[in-house]
Amino acid sequence: MPMPRWWGHINKRVFNPRAIASGRWPVLTHVGRTSGRTYRTPLDAHPVVGGYVFVLVYGSGSDWVRNVLAAGGARLCVEGEEVELTAPRLVGEEEAFHALADEVARPPKLLRISEFLRMDRVAV
């Protein structure tokens, strides 16, 4: 796991609510796989052809990732626009970097991030 799990718990309880309130971050709305509760998670969402790629800073074992995979999709609010996403799948670094625009900063090698989540936009 690239980042320690304990930091993720702090981030979830302290920094995420502030990031959501600021309105500066894309926010993913997803449903808990066992609780059925609706959750909102601020994330870096990178647009790619047909959808979005998300950098898994805490790895694929993160609650939000597991929720999205179990539900088969989520909604993303980007700059006030709601985007319905489907077909979540874990992809490797090569596929993610190929899909991302050249100007999108790649995660530092120091973080050892090798997993990404890709989702498709639902056609309107």
Image (cartoon, grey):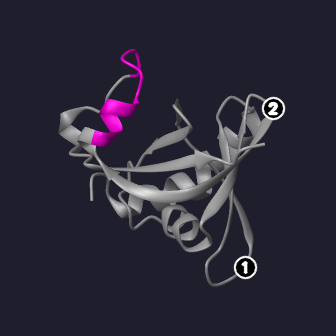
Q: Is residue 96 magenta?
A: yes
| Residue at x 49%, y 62% (from the top left corner) | 65
Residue extending furthest toward the bottom: 34
Task: Tell me the crowding category of disc 1: few under 14, some 14 to 19, or many 20 or more residues within 10 angstroms, Cα based.
Answer: few
Q: Position of residue 58 (x, y in %)?
A: 38, 55
Residue 96: give x, y in percent of width and height: 34, 39
Amino acid, disc 2: Gly
Q: Is residue 2 left or right of residue 70?
A: left
Q: Residue furthest top?
A: 103
Query: Label 1 belongs to which residue?
Result: 36
> Please, is residue 71 above or below residue 47 in the view?
below
Q: Is residue 111 left or right of residue 31?
A: left
For label 2, the residue is: 80
Secondary structure found at label 2: loop
Q: Quadrant of residue 103?
A: top left
Which percent across, then down, holds residue 60?
38, 62
Q: On the image, which quarter does residue 38 sit in?
A: bottom right
Give the SS element for disc 1. loop
What is the span of residues highlighted in magenta in the rendered image? Answer: 95-104
Residue under the point 19% across and 35% down: 109
Q: Quadrant of the C terminus?
A: top right
Mark 1–mark 2 distance (CA, rounded to whole Å): 25 Å
Closer to us: 110 or 87: 87
